[in-house]
Image (spheres, grey):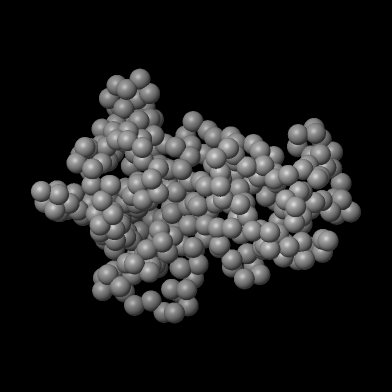
Amino acid sequence: MKGELAKKWLGKLTKLNAATGTGKCRGKAPHKPLLLLCLLDMAEAGELGGRTFTRTAGLVLRFKSYGALVSERWPTRLDLRMPFFYLRTQGFWQAFTLEMTLAESPDSCFVCELHEELFDLLADADFRLKARLLLVSRYFEPRERVALLESLGLCADGMDKVERKMSVLNEEAEDAARKKGRSARFAVQVVSRYKFTCALTGLCCLTMDGAAIVDAAHIEPFAENQNDDIENGLALCKNAHWMFDEGLWSVRRDGRVLLAPQRFTENGPEGLRLQPYAGRLLQFAAGVMLRPKADYFARHRVVHGMP
């Protein structure tokens, strides 16, 4: 019975009614397959707690990160609200307002409830793998496929199954696509596993649409060796990220913030200035077990001439 249901839903994934691009946009619109890939990824990570889901920070982060991989083909802004609302017409879920009445437009849609059959299938690892490979191979161009498979962590498990359907890529283009995919995966893992909380300030700010104030920052500068190890990452708010990349602050072996005061002057409210954080421990949200590797901070200090 499960095998027949899997075939049924895999078949539905081949008929997403994606719009065809015009103007600067070419090919099939990526919105619907990207959203479904995000949900499959969240199911893989154990982030779907039930049939209902909303535009959480984790979902928005994935949609933006994976969406960036198709920006050359689809340069206009990808609006998560559109597939969030319109996939209801193909039976994937029902769409509701905040008051749990049926949503009538993308703007009014805040809650979705997955079809029971689909929700059950999302617990099956074999179905998740087949669904992801199908979506990637059917709706995306060759370079995008390589990047998406890398970002979803599927290159080792699934590349051979998709290659038959992919155009031949030259080695340089494929390598570039893989790097883009690894960067997207790095951003998703770092920001989500640090629970959208800035490691310098302890600030966590999420909009009602799921946008977060933090970015995924590389500790050892990315330009040095393209190190996308998750332990080489920190979630940092915009100001803290810029100041870290500029070498205005780093972290000592004991986990305390180290400043380079000779490199900057600052004025403004205490909460926005860097100086008050000197000597403080990095701040992590409750329950976060991931920690950055001290060796990467050591290399960051060397690069920026700090002790």
* Left-right relation of 12 to 217: left
Up the image or down, 182 lies above or below 196; here it is below
Q: Is residue 117 above or below residue 110?
A: below
Kindly identify the residue that appears in the image at 40 percent across and 49 percent down.
45
The residue most toward the right is: 262
Image point (38%, 45%), residue name: 46
Please say whether residue 125 is visible from this viewpoint.
yes
Q: Position of residue 113 (x, y in %)?
A: 28, 33
Q: Residue furthest bottom?
A: 171
Residue nearest the viewer, comparing 247 with 298: 298
The number of numbered badges drawn on the structure is 0
Residue at the spot x=64%, y=58% of the render? 293
Image quadrant where one finds the C terminus:
bottom right
The image quarter containing residue 73 is bottom left
Q: Give the residue displayed 62% in from the left and 42% down from the top.
A: 284
Nearer to the camera, 5 or 73: 5
Give coordinates of residue 92: x percent, y percent: 24, 41
Q: As drawn, is 268 to the left or to the right of 77?
A: right
Residue 114, quarter of the rendered image: top left
Instruction: State whether residue 151 is above or below residue 279.
Output: below
Nearer to the camera, 82 or 174: 174
Is residue 180 toward the left or the right of residue 153 in the image? right
Q: Where is residue 280 shown, x and y percent of the image? A: 77, 43
Residue 119 picture location, percent across and down: 25, 41
Q: Picture quarter containing residue 21? A: bottom left
Q: Visible in this render: residue 135?
A: no
